[in-house]
Image (cartoon, rainbow, N blue to C red):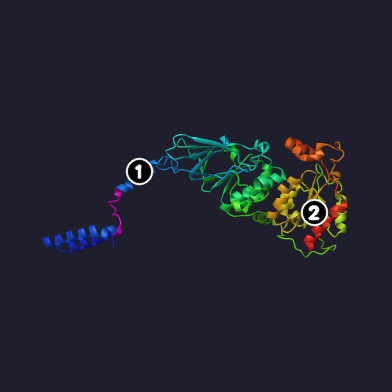
Amino acid sequence: MTYETIFARGLSGRLEKKNMGFGALMGWVVIVLFVCVVVKPYIGPLPFLSLEQSITSGLEMFMSTKEGGEPQQSWSSIEPIKVDNLTNSRSQVYEMYGDIIRIHGNSSTIFVPSIQQHTTNSNWTTKPYARLDDNRAMKKVREFTIIQTPGNLPHCTRNFTSPAIIFSTGGYAGNNYHDFADVLIPLYSTSQQFHKNVIFLVADIHSYWTYEYKLILDNLSEHDIIDIDKENEVLCFPRLIVGLKANKELSIDRSLQFPHISTTNFTNFIRNTYSSGRKSVSNECKKTKTRGPRLLIISRNKTRHLTNEDKVANMARSMGFKVVVREIGWEIPKVAKFVNSFDVMIGVHGAGLTNMVFLPEKAVLIQIVPFALDSAARFYYEEPTKGMNLRYLEYKVSLNESSLFGKYPIDSEIYRNPDAMRNKGWLVFKSIYMDNQDVNVDLDRFRITLLKSLELVCR
């Protein structure tokens, strides 16, 4: 029962009596005192007692709202932004939340309100691409300036309620390996926590790139992509991640990633995105013309070409494999379904092996490792197969199987000490061992590798 109800009933009762005596009046005084002293603490503040507070709040609300409905930022309303620095050796990453984060895309500037006690600005720059230690790649990435300031914040012209992620498709994007290792896998890792309710702000955007990977991007975000480089307006978000979380080449370190997702989560996502069909290889294949294991040989026509691939293919057919030799194209939806249909995939070290992300689990990847490329082969392709639940075999090319043999004097340092060439710089090493080397495998030795793969998929 509220104070107003008690008062109204008492007043109504007294009006029915024509004569109000002194005793009755004193009775009412006792009742009122009782309500004020005993009942009031249990029924909360009375309307007329909270009137001043209501008026004050209304004035503050009115004064803090500019024409058009956007709240102006005053120190009584700004909350300090929390900025988490998640940078590692692979990628610069900053996560911001707590109040409104403003982005002026055309000038590549991010404005972050700081607490009132900070009287000076704190500025730093970042490039949102996951190849931090590669200067050549990072030169092709747009730089953003983050300004943490106690005032002079620009007004929002477009407000969003969903969080956003800024990343770049500059760098080496356009190369099959780097599309996945530098952008798509890190983007998957960074965006999964939002369950598609996240906006992608893409710098250095290329229309062919977003078109090629449209299905993946659409399955990661339910919102339209924003070309942040062309935005002249001030875009405002409640939460912002600048950069992509990356910790391993072509894979995800589950122990370092929250939420705790893995590389197999990503490959399952890829299979679902492209409706590839097979999640895993069946071990019940039979070496017959109709049910032999399917083997794909990825052809390379420019560098690191397998010069006797036709002989390798014929030998594999004689062993019971159903063999296809093909150079992989760029129509990703078709490539994903095509590669998923194979049990074994063979390729010389190079970006074409990235298509292993489309293989079913328990498939076999055979990497042909050219002379002097052992460490690169292990780092970029062997290690990631573990997270993808693939079986891995490799064939190491000897010097006499390499086209480098005979090009240089027999005692050349190029043969004796490839590490010395690496110490002269990546471009020197690359020009010798990657750009000018083809391979011609020994068929008897390679047959042993094929037998191992046959045992793995058919046992």
Which SS class for mark 2? strand
Residue 6 in the image: x percent, y percent? 24, 61
Q: Is residue 258 left or right of residue 271?
A: left
Q: Which residues are magenta?
A: 42-51
Q: Amino acid at mark 2?
A: Leu
Quadrant for residue 8, please give it.
bottom left
Q: Amino acid at mark 1?
A: Leu
Q: Which mark is residue 59?
A: 1
Question: Which sits earlier in the primary sequence, circle 1 or circle 2?
Answer: 1
Residue 37 lies within the magenta run: no
Q: Which mark is residue 296?
A: 2
Residue 260 in the image: x percent, y percent? 59, 55
Which SS class for mark 1? helix
| Figure disc tally | 2
Q: Is residue 21 visible?
A: no
From the viewer's perspective, is residue 95 above or below residue 119? below
The residue at the point 66 percent across, 54 percent down is 263
Category of crowding for the residue at label 1, using alpha-carbon neighbours closer than 10 angstroms: few (below 14), some (14–19), many (at least 20)? few
